[in-house]
Image (cartoon, coloured by chain):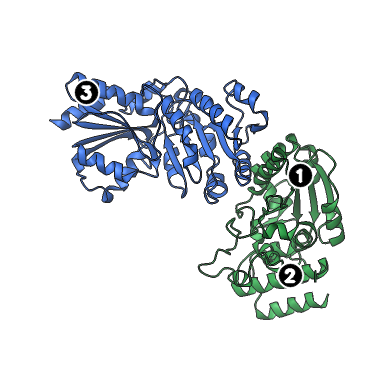
Amino acid sequence: MRNYFAKSLFEIAKKDKRIILLSGDIGNRLFDKYKKKFPNRFINCGVAETNMVGVAAGLAANGFIPFIYTITPFLIYKCFEQIKVDLAYSKLQAFIVGTGSGLSYARLGITHHSMEDLSLMQSIPNMNVLCPGDPIEVDACMKIYKKFKGPVYLRLGKKGERLVNEKKFKLKAFTPNIIQKGSNVAIIAVGNTLDLSQDICDELEKKKIDSTLISLIFLKPLNIKFINMIFKNYKLIILVEEHSEIGGAAATIKNNLDKIKNFSKESLITFSAPDKFLGGIGDQANIRNKINLEKRKIVSKIIKTLK
Amino acid sequence: MKLSNIEFSKNLRQNILMMSHNSQTAHLASSLSCVDIVSVVYNSIVNIDKIKKNNSLRDRFILSKGHAAMTLYSALYLKKIISKKDFNSYCQNNSLFEEHPSIHIKGVEATTGSLGHGLPIANGFGLSSKILGKKFRTIVLMSDGECNEGSVWEAAMFAAKKKLNNICIIVDYNKWQATGRSNDIMQIEPLDKKFKYFGWDVKRINGHNLKEIENVLSSNNIKKKPLAIIADTIKGKGVSFMEDDNNWHYKSPDKKQLIHALDEINSK
């Protein structure tokens, strides 16, 4: 995802002089092309994230559109207050771009895990929260950067994620992306669980169960109309997220049940991470397996429920 | 007719004392220690017309020690940037004029109240000014207690490396923070040397000498460095029974104390 982010940023920066990139001393080589072309619009802010967010606020107040890029926990957790006070309260347009979200940097240890970021970012008024599911969706989100008022949290994974979308497409702001249409089950992927969600759909197909695959992308503001449509059309809805069960997408949907017309308890099953630190377990696949974010386990649960 | 800086300071102090008495809000002494600095900034340095028109070339003043909001509101009021009605709504229900300033108030450049936010934002202003080729400057008023915050030193390193000679900080060095002497709580000293070794041009002044403040703020910064002005001040300055008494960080004057304080300021 981060490579597509760099490429898309280069493209939009060519056309829009307001775009400015701030990096917390990461992205070695990633932005070489950008830096060469726009030396005045690249600022390495050093390993000093709270200052970086303040700098972004100062730039945004003067008409720039800053993209603040570093590893998710360093940006979201360390700078929560700067994001709230300096960016969101002022309703300044700035993109808070976290890389390595969820368990993308699993093996780097719990300092690099971000299983609470959606909870934090969603809770701030005026924030937009975007979770693209594959590199193509990152590109699609970047192309609609003008559509947002106030700050945007763009939750990226790592690099080299599988392309689930077949080709580049035009994303409609605040509308989730339906990738595959079926009739029995709807699988809603939140950000970087799109690959896993696609695997679940493929496995279901082998068992003659056709399913719909949705990449939610827009967690905040949540498109309630769309969610209602899903609950109306499917008797079983599965949501998969690499985030704590507290405050993530599953929690948000459950929090909005009073706005969902056709909700029944049996119609929604969510797969999130437990309220636990996930250190000492290993790579992303191993942690996912340990916390039941795993294809076979999810498919067997779906089949059991459908019976 | 424009008031002299001395008269402007007097008016600020009177307003602040009345606000504190009427609303019974804290931070009176912190508001008084920076009066003379704020007075010179608004009365002699920044272009008020440009602030009123929100002109993109206006000089920016950030009250990073947001707890001195009474001083800022008084200056904005005396300069007619905010209305009397707004000014009088201080700390009333349904008023934006709370104990710390909000960016949504006319003339307020940053939302402050949590310490350590002003200088990073000023860095963004300074960079904007350089990239856009607009010649505005940014002045940040900070407290000595604020220099406990890590973000101040992140921002100090940044400003020096980016050669932001269009920003200037003034540390209202009243030697107190909320619960005690600042240098007893954290190793503040040597504050001037700290900024110097962080790559800043440093000047030390008497923060109650209006001429000194005006001179240092109006001299052209020819060095390719940001400027840190360490202003030695007295907490509660202007009212003898409040001066250097940290109880007035929290206390507000009662009616008798208010009259006594106003009398003293009037007689000076």
Same chain, marks 3 and 1? Answer: no
Q: Is residue A225 above or below residue A196?
A: below
Q: Which structural element holds mark 2? A: helix
Mark 2 crowdedness (10 Å alpha carbons): few <14, some 14-19, many ≥20: many
Can I make out residue B30 in this image? Answer: yes
**Picture quadrant where residue A103 is located:** top left
> Residue at point 45% right, 29% down?
A138
User: Of the numbered discs in the image, which one, if any, rests on residue B166?
Assistant: 1
Report the disc number at residue A204: 3
- Specify the subunit that label 2 lies on: B
In this orientation, does residue B143 appear?
no
Q: Which residue is at 53% across, 51% downward?
A: A89
Q: Given the current orientation, which residue lies at the most extreme left position?
A: A307
Q: How many marks?
A: 3
Establish if B222 lies above or below A44: below
Sequence-first tag of 1 and 2: 2
| Relative image position of residue B70 (x, y in whole percent) | 66, 65
